[in-house]
Image (spheres, rainbow, N blue to C red):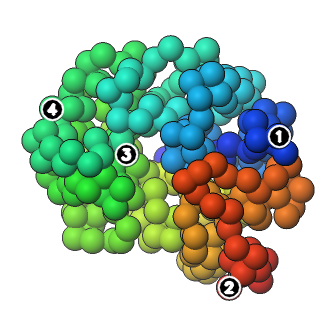
Amino acid sequence: MTPTLYVPLVTPFAADGGVAYDALENLARDLLADGAGGLVALGTTGEPASLGAGERQRVAEVVGRVCREAGAAFVVGAGDGRGGTGGWAVAPDAVLVSVPAFVRPGEAGVVAHFADVAARSAAPIVAYHVPLRTGQPLTARTLRELAAIPGVTGVKHAVGCIDADTVDLLGDRPAGFDVLAGDDVFAPAMLALGATGLVTASAHLDTAAWAKLAATGDRDLGHRLAAQAAALFREPNPTVIKAALHAQGRIPTAAVRLPLLPASPQSLARVRLGT
């Protein structure tokens, strides 16, 4: 099975500060036309915590509709799932649910949390494992426990490195359990180890190349895209990506909402130079 490329969408903002829904729709269509196999609405890249409830609903509706029309996979971020995973105008193929942040419930608590969320969810769950944000590391053994929960079908794996647990998990991946590379710089390496897909915000740019990487695992291409990803993540996500998209004329502003601040011109220049 060829690994799938998912792009976690930015939420474009208009000059008046509101969500630029037309730009969001056009961007979603362009990404799918350029080779993405699916889109994630309201992931971290989409700044969901800064959006109002109505904005979140409409963003998900726009992205879901575009995905349905294109026959692409539609995933929606649901935070840690404690607020529910449903109620979307377009039913998602999966919901992305993060390990609970800040409380650090321990690995057994994480497993119990996902069992509870999955039992209440109409859609399959993809666990979002990002310990830099949540403060809760998980071993390969615990990730296999998550894989055994009915309704938990994969993990977005974003631990900030390729560590022993990464190698362990991918060396004996549970059947039917997707391991999606969620750290852009390490995504090419995770593909080489057997990741079943990519969730890469960097694929807003050079989407066709990222799709080719997912299909071929080309080593030289992987090195180039990893270097580009490093440039795009020199400042907090998605600030540099938005600056680059705005410079290309693809979104109306480079604006982000507090507590994020716009990317510096120096970071954008590094993206343009590819260094």
Residue 16: which numbered mark, if any? 1
Front residue (pair 17, 57): 17
Residue 40 pos. (x, y %): 57, 39
What is the crowding at mark 1: few (fewer than 14 residues within 10 Å), some, or many (at least 20)? Answer: few
Q: Amino acid at mark 3?
A: Tyr
Label 1 with label 3: CB-CB less than 8 Å: no
Disc number lying in front (2 or 1): 1
According to the picture, the residue beneath numbered tag 2 turns out to be 275
Give the Cα separation between the discs numbered 2 and 3: 29 Å
**Callout 2, which amino acid?**
Thr
- In x, y percent, where is residue 2? 54, 50
Secondary structure at badge 3 equals: strand
Residue 173 showing in the rendered view: no
Q: CA distance from mark 1 to mark 3?
A: 33 Å
Q: On the picture, is 227 further left or further right than 65?
A: left
Which quarter of the image is occupied by the C terminus? bottom right
Find disc 3 in the rendering and name its residue: 128
Query: Along the horizontal axis of the image, is 135 left or right of 22?
Result: left
Q: What x and y, as percent, mark residue 64?
A: 65, 26
Residue with the mark numbered 4:
112
* Residue shown at 55% from the left, 64% from the top: 236
Residue 247 falls in image quadrant = bottom right
Which residue shows up at 73% across the image and 53% down it? 255
